[in-house]
Amino acid sequence: MFLKLLTIVFFFSILSQSLQPSSQNLEFTFNGFYPPLSDISVQGISSVTPKGVLKLTNFTTTDSGHAFYSKQIRFRDSPNETVSSFSTTFVFVIRPVVPGIGAEGMAFVIAPNFSLPTAAPSEDVGLFNIINNGNDLHHVFAVEFDTVQDPLDDPDNNHVGIDINSLKSVKTSPAGYWYDNDQFKKLTLVSGKPMQVWVDYDGRTHWINVTMAPFRKEKPKKALVSIVRDLSSVLLQDMFVGFSSATGTILSEHFVLGWSFRVKGKAPLLTLSELPMVKQRSWMTWFALMFVFLLLFTIFCIIPCLVICSPICLVRCILRRRRKFAEEIEDWETEFAKNRMKFKDLYYATKGFKDNGLLGRGGFGSVYKVYDYMPNGSLDKYLHNSPEVALDWNQRIKIIKGVASALFFLHEDWEQVVIHRDVKSSNVLLDAEHNGRLGDFGLARLCGHGTEPETTNVAGTWGYLAPDHLRTGRATTATDVFAFGVLLLEVVCGRRPIEFQNRESGERVFLVDWVFHFWEDGNILDAKDPNLWHDYDLTEIEMVLKLGLLCSQSDPENRPTMRQVLHYLRGDVMLPNLSPSDLRGSERLLGIPEVGFSESSLSTGGSSVTNSLLSVGR
């Protein structure tokens, strides 16, 4: 009977030994986390690198990572007893992406569950969330290494704290260590350098001591953070130990290089020479990482925002511009629809209707000065004032044709006849492409087609005035043709219409007479501008000189019309074979035929006339 009872006792003893939980593992040591590794469980963004480094976070923003010893540790011999003494030491590195600026930090953790499924990233360091932070039923003890000053009574962005069921630490201290018990030396958590930490709890006195020092330094005798607190109300009988970390919008990498732990005794010493190392980043690496970060930020944040917002902004701008420049055409404007300026063009021409362009105000509203901007100024500047930037022949003939088109439009192609009365080089404006634009209609007069213009006072510029205009005081289309003929000679010769041969005697030379004498001598091409470049057509120059003399002859009946002039310039009709004797004296009538000049063969559209034309007759 006794033997049978002894056998049963032995059997139950063996059974209890086999069923004893893994929480009886009271100590462990990791001198690096080298594979194969089955005793470490990682969650979230944590991982173990091939070089044996426990990496808690990576370059993922606003996320958390956990790494726990996979077996439970028994902190009480029975549920009713107090928590036993325990000790741990580990070496860690915090390497920020931006030098000197850390993410949310890391923590050594004792928790009832290593998965921490409800924990939040960022300032919660992957330990708590907004609901369970401060809840005594959470049963979490942690030592935090905080690199961000959060609104949780944090003293700064570089401190160590003891946390019990809350991220609001029960005791904190700036990161550092005591040297010879009386000299405190600061440590920068985000320096990228390895540091060693010791966490000790005395189950009899309830002292919690946290000590830290630079890598390879002995453990200081004086703890960094100390507090008396009985953990019996915090820790359960069986708990998990490990680390937690998190990132926010700013990134840091958090590493653990080695770790040891023991219940009821001092943690085993780490073999520091066997620990893997994490290199500090060079400045070039920092810049490269920042470039990659900014590139990814641009691709995944800025570009999508632009793709979404740009069409919206574009539509709003278009609608706003349409409302701003909406056209309101009154009944009286329909008569002038062909030459009506758009409100948008007027807005820009007057620079937003500023007062410096305001000419006056009257009963019909404000009057502004409006004309196309001519960046190259007037033609006379190039002919007489700037020989170093003389126009070549292609530019000159283009200007001549532009002015001829403008006069044809004024004389024949508009609904009324416009007599300019002041055709001259200073009133020919040049745009950015050196196209000639006829401007300044201050002296212009209107008359109907087929009607005789009224006699007025003589107006114009001396040298361009036709003899018939001086004699009768009546300006006609023929007087504009005369002035245009003088302009032709001025452009080809580079001389003013009137020049002083002798200023003391007042003797003057008229350009028309001067060119005519060259023609009489049989060398009319010698009258061309000596500043002309060599790339020109002598036949075309000779034709323009003779056309200028033809237009500026004294008898208005013998002058060609601007329709004929435009045909000659375009080469549609050859200039008649003229001799100097044909033009000497107004008693000779050349009778230039209208052969080839049809009403529909010419079209100008008025592009060579500046917008000052709109002010005529108003």
Image: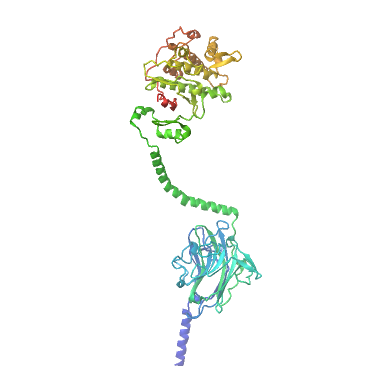
Q: Which quarter of the rendering shows the C terminus?
A: top left
Image side of residue 443 versus residue 29, left or right: left
Instruction: Name the residue located 62 percent from the left edge and 72 percent from the top edge.
Output: 222
Number of marks in the image? 0
The single residue placed furthest to the left in the displayed view is: 331
Quarter of the image holding residue 53?
bottom right
Farthest residue to the front: give it.
Answer: 363
Q: Is residue 49 left or right of 4 when viewed as pictured?
A: right
| Closest to the observer, 515 or 332 | 332
> What residue appears at the point 60 percent right and 12 percent down from the top-left corner?
505
Question: Is 92 positioned to the left or the right of 126 in the image?
Answer: right
Q: Residue furthest right?
A: 180
Residue 522: image location, x then y, percent = 54, 10
Indicate whether 404 appears above or below 318. Answer: above
The image position of residue 128, as x and y in percent, is 47, 66
Q: Position of residue 518 (x, y in %)?
A: 55, 12
- Any part of residue 573 in sight: no
Applied colour scheme: rainbow
Residue 362 in view: yes
**Residue lying at the far top of the rendered structure:** 587
> In the rendering, at what x and y percent does residue 502 appear?
60, 14
Quadrant the N terminus occupies: bottom left
The foreground one among 239 and 459 is 459
Instruction: Give above or below for 259 relative to 82.
Output: above
